[in-house]
């Protein structure tokens, strides 16, 4: 019988591993969309639908139907993703909650790949469909971004409000 090797990682090592995995996802995402576009496929409706559905799945795993803004905020603000996206809670209320992401491994990778500002903005628009899908399983809440790193902002500011 094989013995399992137990490894221990520091918080920063976990963040670095997760960030690298997110960057890998950003690269294959970019390549799939690039080659679909080259093949004449209109990627926009496909990407938006697929990533929104992915977000719904994540939202259902978080526990669907959050009733307050801060309930959803705290479900999103959990685990190693906090460090990978440098997430900070700015406002923590039942009616309105705000979180800022001061870094984004997706945007970082798209920049490394040499994507134009316009391409990065478009890729981010598609990627954010996952956030909107996640929020959609809580019909009492609304989610929006009023600032994005991909569009030249100093952060991505996620705002969750009660409808």
Image (cartoon, rainbow, N blue to C red):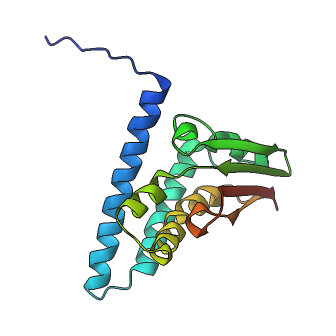
Q: Name which residue lies at 33% across and 17% down.
A: 7
The N terminus lies in quadrant: top left
The answer to whether residue 149 is seen in the rendering is yes
Q: Is 28 located above or below residue 80 in the figure?
A: below
Above or below: residue 83 compared with residue 50: above
Asked if residue 65 can be seen in this view, the reply is no
Q: Where does residue 146 sit, x and y in percent of width and height?
A: 72, 65
Instruction: Say if 60 sits above or below 153 in the image.
Output: above
Residue 143: x %, y % from top left: 70, 61
Looking at the image, residue 71 sits to the left or right of residue 59; the answer is right
Q: Residue at x 25, y 85 (%)?
A: 39
Foreground pick, 92 / 132: 92
| Residue 106 x, y percent position in the rendering | 45, 56
**Measured from the top left, where is residue 100 in percent x and y?**
68, 50
Taking depth in this image into account, of 99 and 52 the one nearest to the observer is: 99
The structure residue drawn at horizontal position 38% and vertical position 36%, both measured from the top left corner, is 17
Residue in view at x 34 percent, y 64 percent = 113
Q: Could you say which quadrant of the image residue 144 lies in?
A: bottom right
Quarter of the image containing the C terminus? bottom right
Q: Quadrant of residue 110?
A: bottom left
């Amino acid at each position: 019988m094989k013995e399992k090797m137990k490894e221990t990682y520091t918080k920063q090592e976990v963040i670095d591993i997760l960030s690298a995995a997110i960057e890998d996802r950003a690269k294959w995402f970019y390549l799939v969309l690039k080659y679909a576009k080259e093949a004449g496929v209109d990627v926009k409706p496909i990407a938006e639908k697929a990533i929104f559905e992915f977000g719904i799945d994540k939202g259902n795993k978080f526990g669907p139907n959050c009733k307050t803004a801060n309930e959803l905020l705290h479900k999103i603000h959990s685990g190693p993703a906090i460090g990978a996206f440098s997430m900070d809670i700015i406002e923590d209320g039942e009616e309105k909650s705000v979180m800022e992401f001061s870094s984004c491994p997706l945007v970082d990778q798209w920049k490394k790949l040499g994507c134009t500002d316009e391409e990065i903005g478009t890729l981010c628009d598609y990627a954010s469909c996952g956030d909107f899908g996640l929020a959609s399983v809580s019909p009492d809440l609304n989610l929006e971004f009023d600032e994005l790193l991909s569009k030249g902002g100093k952060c991505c500011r996620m705002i969750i409000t009660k409808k």
